[in-house]
Amino acid sequence: MRRRRAAGAALALGLLTACSTVPTGSPPVQLTEAPARPAGEVGIEPIGPAVDASPEEIVRGFVDAAASTLQRHPVARDHLTPDAAAAWSDESGITLVGADYATVTTDAGTVVMTGDLVGTIDPRGVFSASTGEPFSREFTVTEVEGQWRIANPPDGLVMLVPDFERLYDDLAAYFVDPTGQRVVPDPRYLLSGEAQPTTLVQRLLDGPSPALTAGVGNALEGVTLTRAVTVSGSTATVDLAGLDDVPTGELGALSAQLVWTLDQLDGVSSVEVTVNGDPLPLDGVPTVQRTDDWAGFSPESVPADADGHYVDAGRLMTVDGQPAPGPAGQGAYGLTSAAVSADPRTSALTTMVGVSVVNGTTALLAGQYGGDLASIVPAGRLSVPTVAATRPEFWVVRDETTVVRVPAGGSPQPVNAPTLPGQGRATALQLSPDGVRAALVVSAADGRSLLVGTVVRSDDGPVALRDLREVAPSLTGVDDVAWRDAGTLVVLAAAGAEDGTVPYEVGVDGWGLTEVPTAGLPGQPTSVAAAPGQSPLVSAQGSVWVLSGGTWVTLVRGQQPVPGTEPFYPV
């Protein structure tokens, strides 16, 4: 995952009137290619208040002055009364507001600022999407030596999204999944500049974001930096202290976290890790490390030869239009959806589950890929199953209320999802490529929304699905979801009640909502599949299509559409 400018979906998240947004209020627009980097240099500094500026001009100037790279934001303080300037902190986070905002002077002489609230960035660089509420702030403006100044500034910065996009980068701090097999991205938004490598490593040392904490490990916990991270050529050097209590077996995970995290930075392709100036004592690993040295920790490892599958008239099919091996491919079970697990070492397809509907009876079947399947979970209704990539198990939602996991060769077990009943009926669930997050489509009275939660595992308790939070609240008609990579979702949704269903991409934290082209599709898509390094698949009007170069095409170019539904990739 390489660095992209914050809203690296650039104008996609945008808050320009015609651009797609995280909040409600502005319709998304279609982006068919990567948007350009916002114009202008990062280092352009705002100017101070003009002489005899009006109260509204002072408020607008204070907001514009948030777009500064100088410590303590001195120009913003120039817009405040002396007492307010002395007390105000610019380190309490950022409130992101759309570019089109209004300021109005009230009869009481205050200035009210209103606009679209996009979300907030906390002091650790974690973005939280707005749930759709507008932004409103009343500023008290008083005279100081004949000039208007703000007496009650908000905590932290109020920043317009175009300024935020220009100044901040969308990065990730990488932590470790509970199996120790993969690193897990935790999105962060950091100010550009020479201090960024040090700040990014410090975010690792500080630990994961609150929503992710219970689902990941951090081999850098308790470790400190002895000095700023330096970059020479393409190598970043990180000197650490406090590793005495880090078990030798965790030094590999520690290195993988640092290497995968710093590899995102422009111009950095290798990392040297030292301990109080001496090389990290890690046998079999070069002093200067690259992601290739920790390829096994890739957050997006996928089976090399695992072709896509789909279901047609009860049969399990492969994307070359051929039946899958065994009874499932012959239609013996009347499958309506399925999921297949692959051996991470050989990419061989091993086990599978499928939802069977025969004579009005619904059940989840399980067994070896290509072999006989047996019923293990009877239900009135089952969601499309999903694979836990780092473990031999499948997940499914039974009767839209209960999340069930099925270990390979084991008995079904309920997943504790304490907040799910209050959010609605779960109609879809997909696990992330690193197995640490789950995306759900939940139907409630106010529409169908997209939620993301954290999978929490313990040695002596049940598996739980916690911290379910809404992603992309502007999409109220969500139908299906898939994982494009460990940090990006593909969603089928409508932005409004009267809009047709189209594909979108959005970051796992809700940042960067963009519409995917629909050119070539015969109608509205009904289900979607995605996987790291693979082209997305959808079903539309009873046939399966693949995205190629911004256009949806038939599975075999130049041939007729292949009938089928519920496409998926083995994991």
Image: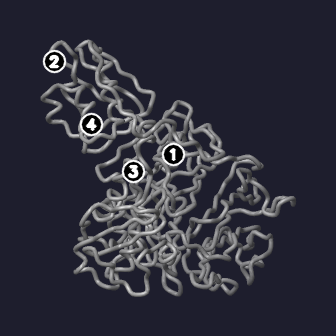
Q: Which mark is residue 189?
A: 3
- Picture coordinates of residue 21, whole percent (x, y): 50, 40
Q: How far apart in space, not on screen, are marks 2 and 1 (Cα)?
A: 51 Å
Which of 521 and 421 lies nearest the eye of the viewer?
Answer: 521
Residue at 23% across, 38% down? 155
Mark 2 crowdedness (10 Å alpha carbons): few <14, some 14-19, many ≥20: few
Q: Residue type at mark 1: give it.
A: Gly
- Indicate which label's residue lies in the foreground, 3 or 1: 3
- Image quadrant in which the C terminus is located: bottom right
- Percent across and percent down for residue 533 are 62, 65
Q: Is residue 106 visible?
A: no
Residue designated by label 2: 144
Mark 3–mark 1 Cα distance, whole angstroms, equals 30 Å
Residue under circle 1? 447
Front one among 476 and 285: 285
What residue is pinned by disc 4?
73
User: Which dot, 4 or 3, sits closer to the camera?
Assistant: 4
Q: Amino acid at mark 2?
A: Val
Q: Give the distance between the C-alpha atoms of the residues marked 4 and 3, in whole angstroms.
A: 18 Å
- Residue 244 shown left or right of residue 298 in the figure: left
Type of residue at label 3?
Tyr
Disc 4, SS: loop
Q: Going from the N terminus, do you reach mark 4 or mark 2 first?
A: 4
